[in-house]
Image: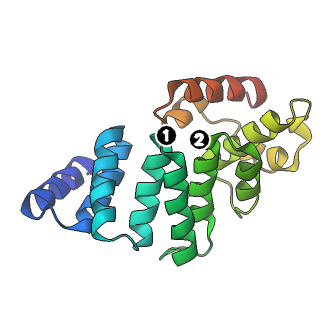
Amino acid sequence: MMKMIFHHIEKSLEHDENDFEVRRISSAISLMQKKYEESEEHGKIAYSMNPNDPRVLAVYGEILVRNKKIDQGLELLHKALELDPIPAGQKTSDNRYRDLVLGYFCKKDYDVCITQAQKIKELEPRSWVFLLFSLKEKDNEINLKENEYFVNKYDDYSKLDWKETIKGFHLPDEEMNKNLENFTNQVIN
C-alpha cells in the first residue's frame, strides 16, 4: 500500500513540481523514510508557494526543528497553531502542541517543553517520554514513578518496545536517540 502511495506522489511531482500539496506530502513521506535533507527541501518549496497554509507550516516546521534549524521551525509551528489551532478532522489542538513539544525538546528548552506537553489532552508515547525526560532534566531528584503524568500513562506505554518506538520519532540526532533509549530503559522498563 505504501509503495503505491509513494509511486503516485512521485508521479504527481513529475507531472507538476509546483503543486504545493504534493510537495507538502512529499516532505512528510521523506521524513518517514528518514531522508531529512530531502524532506526539508520539499517543505521549503511548499512553504515558498504557500506560506500561510497551516499544514505546510507544520510539516516544514517539524523537519526544521529536527534538522537543527530550531528557532525557524518553532516560529512556523507557532504560526500553524495560531492560524489553525484545531486542524481539520481533529477535536483538539493536541497535534499542534505535540509539534511544539517536539520543537522545544529538540531545542533542549525543557521548561517550555513541559508547559506545551501539559496542554495536550491525550499524551501519545513521543510527547509522554519527552515530558518525562524534560521533568527529569529540570529536576534530577524527581521521583517520576510518583508523578501524575508517569502514573496516568505507564500502563498504556510500559510494554512498548522503546527502542523501536524511539526510531519512529524520526530524530536525526543519534545522541538524542541514545539518551532517550537510556532514559526509557532506566525509568520505564
Tag 2 secondary structure: helix
Residue 92 x/y as whole percent: 62, 73
Residue position marked by numbered label 2 in the rendering: 106
Residue 19 x/y as whole percent: 20, 67
Three-letter code for the amino acid on which mark 1 is drawn: Lys
- Can you tell which mark lies on residue 45? none
Residue ID at (34%, 48%)? 40
Tag 1 secondary structure: loop
Q: Which mark sits nearer the N-terminus, 1 or 2? A: 1
Q: In this view, does 164 lie to the left or right of 114?
A: left
Residue 15 x/y as whole percent: 7, 62
Q: Can residue 84 be seen in this view?
A: no
- Can you tell which mark lies on residue 68? 1
Residue 152 x/y as whole percent: 81, 51
Q: In this view, does 17 lie to the left or right of 112?
A: left
Residue ID at (46%, 55%)? 61
Residue ID at (36%, 40%)? 36
Three-letter code for the amino acid on which mark 2 is drawn: Cys
